[in-house]
Image: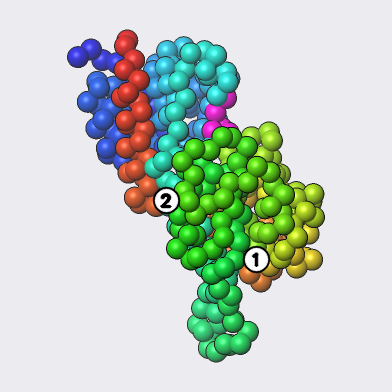
């Protein structure tokens, strides 16, 4: 077979993806720690790029790659890729939400159980020699109402976990959703979510219309005290609305795997101050954007991308 060209691998991947690309005679340029400037220097010779969150695949980077045929994202969010410009150039954009949706769902479930059972606080107290039972009395999930915003791969996976707890599960997604499982009620609008939800979980991509999706207006519409979970993108939840909900007690707990500015070292002073204020509230658990970052998901995402790339059958 003729060489298909060079692929820049700018993210950690599993061997299954490397082997699949080599089987199709792609040459691999593996630079998982590459920076933006270096990427602009080397991408000109590439027909494909596998990326995650390290690179911004913007107009400048795309223009520096005249041979580029496809962009493959390890994960789901495409906010760092100028998809419209790439597609206008005839470049195919691929993602792999099927590969890490279970990992995200399990993590969201872990955050929820940690909050409702006071696991983090009580474990720290026991290590410190304290034995506080009444203060750590938890709540049960059975019979409670969960509202899922976004019913794609991850929202659907989270609902599957919740149904084992005999909960009422409502979901909202502006897109037409097919094959809705019987234990989920798709809502035509947010009204029922606002009225009934006691556990609110976001599973949406970051776009113009989802930036600060959870804002002061959303908070005011919520009629129940609730737990907020966000394992999607940090900017989906407005920090001011989050703080207002925690301060008033309307938000009884929050599980946050993502923040508007990441990581800690890149936060502005204002963002860092809000971040630290949020984490001081009881019932708040923060994790470092690891929901979809399991050992198994690395292979699954790599497998998904391998299959999608090989299905393109691009001829050089």
Q: Position of residue 68 (x, y in %)?
A: 43, 16
**Residue at (39%, 18%) from the top-left corner?**
47
Q: Position of residue 18 (x, y in %)?
A: 28, 33
Q: Nearer the viewer, residue 18 or 236?
A: 236
Q: Nearer the viewer, residue 179 or 227?
A: 179
Q: Is residue 189 visible?
A: yes
Q: Residues within 10 Å of mark 1 (few under 14, many from 20)?
A: many
On the image, numbered disc 2 is attached to which residue? 102
Please, what secondary structure does the residue beneath circle 1 have? strand
Quarter of the picture containing the N terminus is top left
Mostly what secondary structure, the magenta segment?
A: loop
Which residues lie in the magenta part?
Answer: 78-82
Is residue 241 in the magenta section? no
Taking the image as shown, residue 209 lies to the left or right of residue 36, namely right
On the image, numbered disc 1 is attached to which residue? 253
**Residue at (41%, 41%) from the top-left corner?**
98
Taking the image as shown, residue 140 lies to the left or right of residue 23, namely right
Q: Are marks 2 and 1 in contact (CB under 8 Å)?
A: no
- The image quarter containing residue 280 is bottom right
Mark before the other along the chain sequence, 2 or 1? 2
């Amino acid at each position: 077979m003729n060489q298909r060209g060079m692929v820049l691998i700018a993210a950690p991947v599993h061997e299954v993806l490397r082997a699949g690309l080599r089987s199709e005679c792609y040459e691999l340029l593996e630079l998982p720690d590459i920076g933006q400037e270096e990427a602009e220097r080397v991408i000109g010779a590439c027909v494909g790029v596998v990326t995650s969150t390290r690179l911004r695949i913007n107009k400048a980077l795309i223009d520096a790659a005249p041979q580029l045929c496809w962009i493959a994202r390890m994960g789901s969010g495409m906010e760092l890729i100028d998809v419209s410009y790439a597609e206008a150039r005839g470049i195919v954009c691929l993602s792999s939400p099927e590969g890490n949706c279970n990992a995200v769902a399990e993590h969201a479930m872990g955050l929820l159980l940690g909050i409702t059972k006071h696991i983090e606080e009580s474990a720290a107290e026991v290590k410190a020699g304290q034995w506080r039972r009444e203060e750590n009395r938890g709540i049960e999930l059975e019979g409670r109402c969960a509202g899922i915003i976004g019913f794609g791969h991850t929202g659907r996976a989270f609902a599957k976990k919740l149904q084992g707890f005999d909960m009422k599960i409502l979901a909202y997604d502006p897109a037409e959703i097919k094959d809705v499982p019987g234990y989920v009620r798709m809502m035509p609008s947010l009204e029922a979510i606002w009225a009934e939800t006691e556990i609110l979980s976001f599973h949406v991509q970051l776009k113009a219309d989802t930036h600060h999706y959870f804002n002061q207006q959303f908070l005011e519409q919520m009629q129940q005290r609730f737990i907020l979970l966000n394992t999607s993108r940090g900017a989906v939840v407005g920090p001011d609305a989050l703080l207002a909900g925690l301060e008033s007690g309307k938000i009884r707990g929050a599980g946050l795997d993502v923040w508007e500015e990441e990581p800690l070292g890149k936060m502005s002073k204002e963002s860092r101050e809000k971040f630290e204020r949020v984490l001081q509230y009881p019932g708040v658990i923060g994790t470092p954007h690891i929901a979809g970052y399991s050992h198994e998901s690395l292979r699954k995402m790599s497998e998904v991308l391998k299959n999608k790339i090989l299905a393109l059958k691009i001829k050089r």
